[in-house]
Amino acid sequence: MADNKLDIIPLYEWGMFTEPRPSVVAGPCSAETEEQVMETAKGLRDMGINVYRAGIWKPRTHPGCFEGIGPEGLKWLKRAKEEYGLKVATEVASEKHVVECLKYGVDLVWIGARTTANPFLVQEIADALKGTDIPVLVKNPVNADLDLWIGALERLNGAGIKKIGVIHRGFSTFDKIKYRNEPQWQVAIELRNRYPELPFFVDPSHMGGSKEYIREISQRSLDLGFEGLMIESHCNPSVALSDAKQQLTPDELSDLLYKQVVVKDKDSDSPEWKENIDQLRAKIDVIDENILYALASRMNVSRQIGEYKKSNNVAILQMSRWDKVFAKVIAKGNEYGLPDEFIKAIYSAVHETSVEIQNQVISDNS
């Protein structure tokens, strides 16, 4: 199912985003008061934002925290829509949420990371949206489960929803990192490779967890060619009832979008660019072929090792040997300027495949 083609209406046919990139959805983490919603909406409208977001229901880890203002906030979003000509958006996590959003004319909804991880809730939302024309953005699940992310898209598409896209907000981790959530860009890149037509937003506010990281994450996402950004903006972040540290004022957001980040072109008509890029890509093709040949040769040696282990009744896993190999390749990779995590990922995959090949050799006719 994961490789099925999705039936998608392109982002720029949704009637709310225009080229050039980036397409931006911005607004406070939570709708808190009518004054806050309207003041922030005006500030964002004046700087050119067209799609205004605000959380109405907030899924919080612990009870007793601010869990959103509820349907009352939808009235404020409707007012912002009518007075400032904005498209308005919020997060939904149930059929009830969808019904309330339809009642108040919400233009776009998104499914949060915790909800994406629950296929029952995603299906409930998809069924509630059936027959509507509302665009839906799907945040990645909390954990780096690509199939679960794709499954949510398939459920929406199966309900006839064609204006769908994704939001990459990073993944939960127990590791100590500077960001709130681990980017794991390779997961997002793999999704883009599978579905190049899928509208792709990045949420630097939730990924970074602090406004000091919003610029670098935004630039990275634009460098990768993703179409949009969802950024939290509050008229007075210091008094925000949720996620105060990661929200920008409208003025700060304006500086970010118009002065700090650089949108890269998807291609260039320059003859020099065409000639040089074609030559460099041809070199990569040759290098890739050499890499594949080297990997095949290595696996052939692993197969021979499996034969020797089989004939001598020796266990497959030899961790002391593997630890030495691992340390050696990390050191050699450092000499070539390659990051440790990159080497670890590659050689963990190589080792796993090598063990599997040896296991097959020992299992055959044993």
Image (cartoon, rainbow, N blue to C red):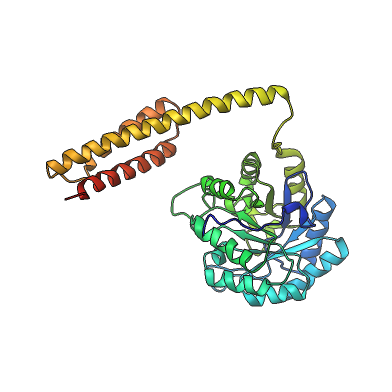
With respect to residue 324, does 179 lie above or below? below
Q: Is residue 180 left or right of residue 215?
A: left
**Residue 249 spot, x, y in % from top left:** 74, 52
Q: Is residue 33 left or right of residue 287?
A: right
With respect to residue 131, does 200 lie above or below? above
Q: Residue furthest front?
A: 365
**Residue 65 spot, x, y in % from top left:** 58, 70
With respect to residue 17, does 283 lie above or below? above
- What residue is rendered at 54% in x and 59% in y? 149
In this orientation, does residue 70 appear? Answer: no
- What residue is rendered at 17% in x and 38% in y? 308
Q: Residue furthest right?
A: 83
Q: Is residue 313 left or right of residue 248?
A: left
**Front residue (pair 178, 26):** 26
**Front residue (pair 98, 266):** 266
**Residue 52 spot, x, y in % from top left:** 76, 59
In this orientation, does residue 248 appear? Answer: yes
- What residue is rendered at 71% in x and 76% in y? 100
- Say how many tags the image has: 0
**Residue 310 spot, x, y in % from top left:** 16, 43
- What residue is rendered at 37% in x and 34% in y? 295
